Amino acid sequence: MLKIHDLTFTYPGQKIPALSSVNADITPGKLVLVTGPSGSGKSTLLHCINGLATQHYGGSAEGEISVAGREIAGKSLWQISELVGTVFQNPNTQFFQLTVEDEIVFGLEHAGLDRATIERQLIRALQDVEIEHLRHRDLFTLSSGEKQKVALASILAMDQPLILLDEPTANLDIAAIHELKEIFKKIKKQGRTILVSEHRLWYLRELADQLIVIKDGQIAYDGQPNILKSTEFRDAIGLRIWEQSPQTKMTISCLKKHQETILKVSGLTGGPSRKKHIVNNIDLTLETGCCVALMGHNGAGKTMLSRLLTGLQKEQQGSITINGQALKTRQRIGKLACVTQQADQQLFSDTVLDELLIHPDDAPATRQQAEQMLKQYDLSQLAGRHPQTLSGGEKQRLAIAAAMIANPGIIILDEPTSGMDRRRMELLAEQIVTLCRQKVLVILITHDVELVASCADQILWMENGTVTETINRNGFEVLLNDLMKMNSTNERHEHEISNCLLK
Amino acid sequence: MIRGYIQRLGQRNPNCPFERLDPRCKLLMLLIVTAMVIVGDGVACAGLFVAVGLLACFSRLVKLFFITSIFSIILWCVFFVIFNTVLKRPLDDPRAMFFGMVFRGTTLTITGVWFAMTTKLRDMTAALEAWKIPAVIILPLTIAVRFIPTLLHESLVIRDSMRLRRIAYRRLDLLRKPHLIGHSYLALVTIRSLKMADELAAVAETRGLARPGIKNTYRPACFKKCDYYALGLLTSLTIVLTTLSIVLP
Amino acid sequence: MSLKTNTEPSGTQHKPNNYLIARRPAQPFPSRLRSHMDTYGWSRVSPVGNEKEYWDDIHRNGSAEKNRRTAYIHIPFCGTLCTFCNFQRKPGTAAMAADYAQWVLKELKWYAQSAYVAQGGFEALYFGGGTPSLLPSEAMVELVTAARQTLGLADTAEITVESTIHDLNEEKLQAMVQAGVTRISLGVQTFDTTMRRQLGRISSKSTIAGTIAAARQAGIQTISADILYRLPGQTVEAFADDLACAVELNLDGVSMYPLIAMPGTPLEKGLERQSIAALPDLQIEMNQCRMAHQYLADSGYRQDTCTHFVKSKDKNLYANIRLDDGDCLPIGCSAGGYLGPLVLMNAMNRQMYQGQISADKPGYMGSLMLPAKSRLLRSVTGQLQRGFLNPKTVWQDGSIDVESIIADKLKSFQEKGLLAPSDDHYKLAREGWCWSYNIAADFANIASQKDAGADMMGDFSGAVKPQTHPHAVKYASRGKRSGMYGFTIKDLSVLGVMCALVVVVQFVAAMLLHLVGVAVIPGVMQFVMAFASCIVMFVALRKVPKAGALSIMSAVYSMVTMLMSGSILMGFGLVIGGVLGDVTAKQIGGIHKTAPLIIALMIYRVSQTTFSKLYAFITDMTQVQLVWYLIVLSIIMSAIGAVAGGFAGMKLSRKITKAGVMA
């Protein structure tokens, strides 16, 4: 289905090729997992296959790629799109229309098909992805998981033999990931060839037929995926967990010594409007130097809680006390630092140094302080660059630095590791631990079980707007296992049943 | 508010009969009504006013109709009182102004809003395609409408980020430091928009939108019986009003 | 029916086994290329942009090139699928083929009004696929007759139909002859029944002989058969038996192909799984090839092309004309062909094809314009596949120095004993015939080589000499896609998103003004709105500095306004302003320069404000002097706001250039 022969690709203006001498041979009907550390060339490989790398990004490629026996070179992008369909990472920039049906039909219309065929393929795509009930829904009202399903449905409707997915679970919560996994199972049975580029590997355990690992632009491994069971292999490349749930690491336990309470929340209720309450009656007491992970499914109220805490949203009832002072909404703004998922949206200046020097009138930072901060976050050599030209990890570090330069006692990190590879996640975990040492309360809102296992002291599980469970370190494994549905007894049991049935 | 508008542009309302009309027909109706409002005299406009009132009843715009009419009447009264009584400089033709503000003004407004409320984006693009408007206009139109809520959301997020960093977060700052808004908000939102446009173009290319050759529409625009009835109705109304305005003084 | 009907005396009784070659000549290439598809190196060119216009022109005005002409009709259905085939075909029934034939008839109707077709000169018509013989008799007659009429085929024209043995019965053969079919090409592959079954073929050896006899009886003039060698587990002796059968049957033409395990075919899968015996190694394959050549030559066959052997009756016109740089008009779904310098492709799948035909268009989907060097190499490979290479006749308009391009390779192949000089040209030596695809591919790949020799020749894609085709000068590459007016998807995407940003920024500005409470001050609102929108539009037009971009943005913005508020006056104002602004900018230097851009934005904004204030005129509010003053103030303030916005936009675009988004 896909043959790559000696592919070398260089982005325009770069001397070092992004991919060198890549060879691959993928037979039809397989699900291939492509993984590797960030920046290794996974996305570049996918873009080479769908033609964007040379024709959209303007790079130069040598070597041959052929899909279904036909060469990609010399074909225009729309010709390649008949053979290769791509689902991108960000569900928000993949849509052209306002409703689900219009979106799926959009690509089919441009293929010049007649109406009866369009209708047929639309219905089939909706059934394949199990979103018939969403057919007439507005795209803006869907959750990330549903949006990603719609994106997948619009590609499936085009009936291409090869489907590429570029980090499809980057913005999804765990429930949505499980749903996506079931859909993959279904479409794989239909005989489509699927290529998934991912950091999050565990959900493809039973699905992946082939594993391709790319490191520094070259193929480091191409073969059976069960090599991922080996921890040494994963450590050598820097890959995330595969089978076992993450090991809970030892960090400073804030329960050992008595730390001072920095944040006290009582009876907090609030929401986007007076009548609609998303957060209901939350009571929290959190101490400095702790790292608290706030977990829960999408819609549980985590983001609303962070908005209430930071003062972006006015609370309906309840009080928030910081450092012993009960603060109203307006007074709270700026007291808590918050770094959101998209660091892009928090960087305002023209240079990295200026970013740290943007200061409110009441708390100016000096140039020296700014340079010190840059050194601390390993950004000194980037001081003159424009913040928007930095890589994802650097942007996030800069956002955290910019937030911390005002010396807040509390920082909230909202989904900091979406789309991150293991090394960067570990770096972030180290940074969080450093912040804790500096007596900062770190509140982590995340789905990333590995990050939580690496650096959190407590997990607050939220459901329906309240904190239903507070779990300390020794209880982590049970919860995390549950989340990843990796309970080994369950698996063994199912295996035994299927063995009996086969006899 | 804008988000609600845009969502309405996508969702079809099966109970509304006017949505079944072809947008070309509605556009034609809008043009004819505008032309009549501009050209017609008092009688014709009064007639149109009544007709539009009836239209408003059937399309749930009654409240807006009354509000607009009453507001125009009040405004006219204010002008009348000020110029005739206080300033002692009477208006040239207060009757014409009354007709103009109340009848013509309300008719134009309500017909426009009726068009906006009953036309969905997809129907509009289908109608434009039927008129052989090239893809260079239709594709950006689709993208523009679809991105308005996204960019609005971006703006809100950027505003929140600015508030968290305490950059221009008070009302006073808008007056004292408006340049900060330009530097911080506008630059960032423009950069984000351009990046999104680039990503979207990549998605569009891989979906095969650049394919030459015929493009088939799933719900093509076509004139149906209801369009002809509507146009027929409007034509007869035009004739009646023209006759009346000639016959009556 | 005995096997020996109509046998001509074949001379001495020789068996092919006598030709087993004892010595093993050295291998001139590392691996053997087995398909003509490997020789298409000359076709790897990028689209020029005006291919469709060129094609349209040819069909409107005819072609000035004096190429020989053929036509090809593709029937993409097969009753059963052979395990080795990866051609464009789908499993189908006769009824499906008949249905499809109706679409082809419609396409032929389109071609009936083409000036190119009216010029006539078609010498051969080929029905390929799939299995054209799947068509039921009535459909076959209708299609062949219509094709003959449309193309103006003379009675001497060669009309070939690819067939399977089991599709042909007396009734169908008679119908075919009546319609004008002169030649059939049978997919025999092998006479060994067991092997036939393994390849997915149906009939047995005796049936083959019977059908051939019936065909002769019905009046088919030329019967040719395809034979495969290099079959799984096939020895040289087994192949020799096949050859003996073929000669015995006195076929007019024999085509010999080595079996290729195409990717994705059941054959390839079977070989992988080892459920099918392995293919013979190269030595056995070469022996089979050499033996076949010698044996058939001694049995009275002449080698016509590298795969086809003929007796006197089989002219093999279609293949010969195509290899002689001839035109081939493709008809039907997924058919390909040539038209002058264009390589043509019809719609690849049936839905697309039917869509085109329903819209009263032919099946043409796309084409590539071949530069002169590619055409030369195509001609070279065409000659080589016919067994010779004549540097004088291979390219005749004098625009290219042929010798210098092919000299190196000629010398090297002569040294290897694959080409031999003969009079003023070169012929393929005995051994050269067996490596003909390799030789042809080697020449074909000169097109993609970037060596010093090629550089010396200069850039042939732009070669303009007096003898080149007049169309090549008229249609110099513009690099634009018709219908998109020079705008790419990227441009349109930027314009769309920036238009959305204009709406949002204006909304935000209006909200902020209301928040601060200055909205009621006359003129301020207009100034700020103009300022806000022009900043963004300046940046957008800096990113897409093409003429027409402002018109597009204003048209889109007016549609958005219509959809959101139904204000038709403002809609008009926007479009008129945008177009006026664009035209003005073009006149005074181009919209890519700053001053014309700012002036254009001002015109645009003033037009918008004026038209939206027309409302006041219509409602007679202008009787009040104050309203007049307010209107004039609005217009002036919006003009100033636009200019200020333009300058601010300049600053903004410089600021964001560092972010790398303005490339």
Image (cartoon, helix red, strand yellow):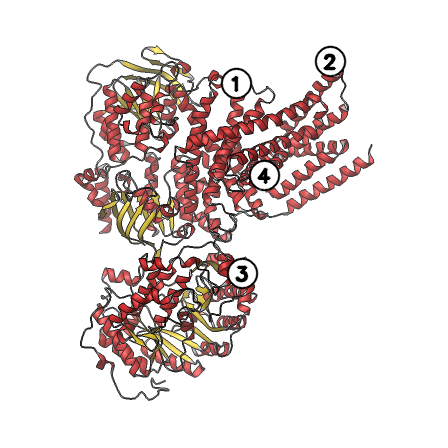
Alpha carbon separation for disc pair 4 and 3: 34 Å
Label 3 is found on which chain of the structure?
A: C
Answer yes or no: are tags 2 and 1 on the same subunit. no
Q: Which residue is mark 2?
A: B86
Label 2 is found on which chain of the structure?
A: B
Q: Which residue is mark 1?
A: C516
Q: Nearer the viewer, mark 4 or mark 3?
A: 4
Instruction: Residue type at mark 4: give it.
Output: Thr
- Mark 1 / mark 3, whichever is N-terminal: 3
- Mark 4 / mark 3, whichever is N-terminal: 3
Task: Please tell me how crowded label 1 is: few (under 14), some (14-19), or many (20+) other residues with Cα within 10 Å.
Answer: some
Specify the label residue C57 is tagged with. Answer: 3
Q: Are marks 2 and 4 in contact (CB under 8 Å)?
A: no
Q: Residue furthest top?
A: A325
Answer yes or no: are tags 1 and 4 on the same subunit. yes
Task: Judge from the rendering whether residue C599 lies leftward or rightward of residue C396; answer left or right.
Answer: right
Task: Please tell me how crowded label 4 is: few (under 14), some (14-19), or many (20+) other residues with Cα within 10 Å.
Answer: some
The vertical placement of B50 against C430, above or below, is: above
Answer yes or no: are tags 1 and 3 on the same subunit. yes
The C terminus of chain C - image quarter: top left
| Residue B96 percent location from the top left of the image | 75, 27
The N terminus of chain C - image quarter: bottom left
Whether residue C617 is visible to the viewer of this picture, yes or no, is yes
Q: Which residue is mark 4?
A: C584
Instruction: Residue type at mark 2: give it.
Output: Val
